[in-house]
Each structure stands twice: as C-alpha cells, then as structure tokens.
Image: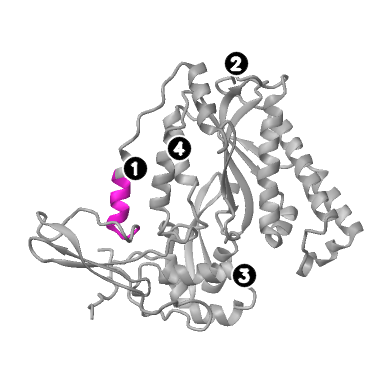
Amino acid sequence: MLALRPPSARQILEVANIFRGEAASFLQDYSKQLSSQQKRVFSDIQACRTAVMGGHVRACNDCDHREIAYNSCRNRHCPKCQAMARAQWLAEREAELLPIPYFHIIFTLPAEVAAVALQNKRLLYGMLFKAASATLKEVAANPRHLGAAQIGVLAVLHTWGQNLMHHPHLHCVVSGGGLSQDDSRWIASKDYYFLPVKVLSRVFRNKFGRLLEEAFGRGELGFYGKLAPLAEPTAFRHFLDAATNREWVVYAKRPFREPACVLKYLARYTHRVAISNRRLVSYRDGHVTFRYKDYARQSAQRVMTLTASEFIRRFLMHVLPDRFMRIRHYGFLANRDRRSKLKTCRRLLGCDAPPQSQHDNIEQAECEAVGHADETETIIRCPLCKTGRMRIADTFGRLTRRCRWPNNPLPAEIPYQDSS
C-alpha cells in the first residue's frame, strides 16, 4: 500500500476544495436540476489529482527520494487541467501568424436573449458563432469598408462575467486584412481601424434575430420556468421585437502592437474556465470569497462573497454541452483549406512561415512535472538532492472503478497532492 501524504498547510485554495467540502449539501439542494454534463464536471473536479484518479510514484535515482503524483481529470472545465491543452494549441497557432495587425472584436448577447441561451445552450451558442462570423465576413467583403472577400477569424466562446453570472459573448481575433475574391492580392486594413462597430452591431443583431426566429418556427427552442410563456407565438414575437429594436453590444479593442502579442492574448482567453484558482480569496463557514473586476467602475478590483452552494451553482452554469467546440476558425483560417490559404497569404505578403517556438516544449515539461500528463515519463531533477533524476518507480490505479455521481459522492477527506 502507498502511504498518501496529507494536505499541506501551504496548499493553495482551489475550486476543488470547495466542491469537496460542499458536495453533500449541494447534492441535497441541486441534484435534480443539473444536467449529466454538469454532474460529470462536479465529480471530475473533486477527483482531479487525488488518489481516486490513480497516479504514479517518482523516485530519485541518486538519493531514493520519493514523491506521489496523482492523475488529472482532463476535464476542459477544470481549472487545473488547461495548461497542457493550451500549450499544445498555442504551438499550432504560432505557425499561423502573419506579419499584419490583428484586431480583437467582442460580440455580446443582450440579457433577455442570454436567458433563452441558458436554456438552449447548444443551439444558441452555435447561433452566436454563426451570426458573428457571418457578420465579420459580410462587412469585411463590402467594398465600402474593406473589400476583402476572405479574412481570418478565430472565435472563442465565453459564457461568464467576472461575477460568474451568465454573460455569453464571443472573443474574435480578426486579421487586419484579407484575400481578394480570386486570391490574387492581399487587401490590407488601416493600421488602427478595421470595420465600423455600429455596422457590425446592426448586422449581427439582424442575423442573430433571423436565426432565432427560424429556430422558433422549426420548434427547436425550449422555454422553461419564467420563460415558459414565450412558447406562445405572439409572446415570442413581442420578445423578439423588443430584443432587436435596440442596439446590441459589439466592442472593438485597439489592435495588437505586433503579431507576437496575439499569442499572449490567446493564452489568456482560449482555455479559460469560469474562474481560476488565483481569484479565490477564502472559503470558510460555508461561504466563498473571490476577486473580480467591476467593469462598471473602470475595472476596479473588488471582492464578492457567496454561499458555497451559490458559488458552485454559478460555476456549473457555464458547463458546455458535450463535444461543443468553443474555439472555432473561419475564413482563410478555416480547417478545410487553412494550409493552402496561409501559404497564399505569405506569398502575397512576401514573408516566410515563423520558426517553431521552443517555449511550448518547456511549458509542456513543466505541466507534466505537476501531473498534467499521466502516461509520459519526464526527466525532472530531484527537489531534495538537486542532482539525481526523478523516474517513475511505480503506478497505481483508481481507488474505485468509477467514482461518479450521484450514488457515491467523493468524501472531503480524500487526500490530494501536496504542492509545496
């Protein structure tokens, strides 16, 4: 039997600690209200890097120092399991950068439409991608604005605000220019201006409204609770008219100073979850305190305290449907012919492909060292003698075959890896 170490007094507060501590009371109040995906996320985050997931023992080949590393859950909603996926994804994106300005444009759903989206996640989040990408391509192709038939768009879905409430919006990184219709020339945008925001807002609103109306006509929308009256056609018509008779928010940020800055941005946004462990302040007496930016007051740093059950409810609100792609590519970055289109772009711009960065290999090794990769043995210096190398000496499987919801929720006292 392996001797599992108890939690360290220096252990950083994590979302998993809150989930474990409140599992029993949260199940009692919300078990019937959660989807199967939310149940799985709740279970996976509790089990992540604990003995439940199994793991391996590393031993120094010089001083025989031993350490236990537990396996990751690898759930895309887990705050601890995104570093490896982010590093691999960024390595691929780095090879696609062009020596042009890139613009950051954000499409946001209004509150009343967001409420419908919360009850129809897969359908309306898909509409958000479709309407935003079609808007960018249509307005960019207009000769009055840019006249580029093919631009590059990378879109990332976020469904949360800083206070963890539902706030679906799409972050788009857009190329500052694009290809002509026949791929014969590159059409560049101005250095500090891409497309008119008001035009983008109105085209986006009209496209999304039309998609929403068509979905209602096909009977694809579900309305529950307070939204149940919208299932009646007249009520839905009034709802849609009220939502589309005002301006929708489309926000354009200043362009990135240079292409390398795009990667730093992507690292912050692409694999983010609703809240990171760094924002947690305290968890005591059934309450959770965390930091957030108050955008209504010039992004001032504030703290918010919620009951632990409400904190977990808000976190699970942002669980996406299974196999839903939250990062998508359009235009000349679309998967179908990305390689050939990028080759054409570089030829017209007179540039070569960027060299492969070594940064991501270093980050990958660091991720593996703390348990992100469960199968690959990585060379790590012994933290005790500083000269030996840590090698995998033993492995052990899960404590249970499948410790899942809801029959056997994870007990709070299951040990987790000491980060000291």
Sequence-first tag of 4 and 3:
3
Q: Position of residue 191 (x, y in %)?
A: 55, 21
Q: Magenta region: which residues? A: 362-372
Q: CA distance from mark 1 to mark 2?
A: 35 Å
Q: Nearer the viewer, residue 200 or 32?
A: 32
Q: Residue at left 63%, top 53%?
A: 167
- Tell me if residue 128 comes above or below residue 251 in the rendering: below
Dot 3, how many residues are within 10 Å of its Cα: few (below 14), some (14-19), or many (20+)? few
Image quadrant in which you'd find residue 376: bottom left
- In the rendered view, does 25 fall on the left or right side of 56? right
User: Mark 2 vs mark 4: which is more N-terminal?
Assistant: 4
Query: Where is 176 relative to 157, above or below?
Result: above
Image location of residue 72, percent across then percent down: 38, 63
Q: To which residue does mark 4 refer?
A: 93
Q: Secondary structure at mark 1?
A: helix
What residue is at 66 percent from the left and 24 percent from the top? 149
Disc number lying in front (2 or 4): 2
Q: Identify the secondary structure beneath mark 2.
A: loop
Q: Is residue 361 magenta?
A: no
Residue toward you, 293 or 14:
14
Label of residue 184 in the image: 2
Write down the residue under mark 1.
Answer: 360
Quadrant of the drawing holding the C terminus:
bottom left
What amino acid is labelled 2 in the image?
Ser
Q: CA distance from mark 3 to mark 2?
A: 50 Å
What residue would you read off at disc 3? 35
Using a 10 Å C-alpha cutoff, classify the residue at mark 2 as few (fewer than 14 neighbours), some (14 to 19) or many (20 or more): few
Q: Quadrant of the N terminus?
A: bottom left
Alpha carbons under labels 4 and 1: distance apart: 11 Å
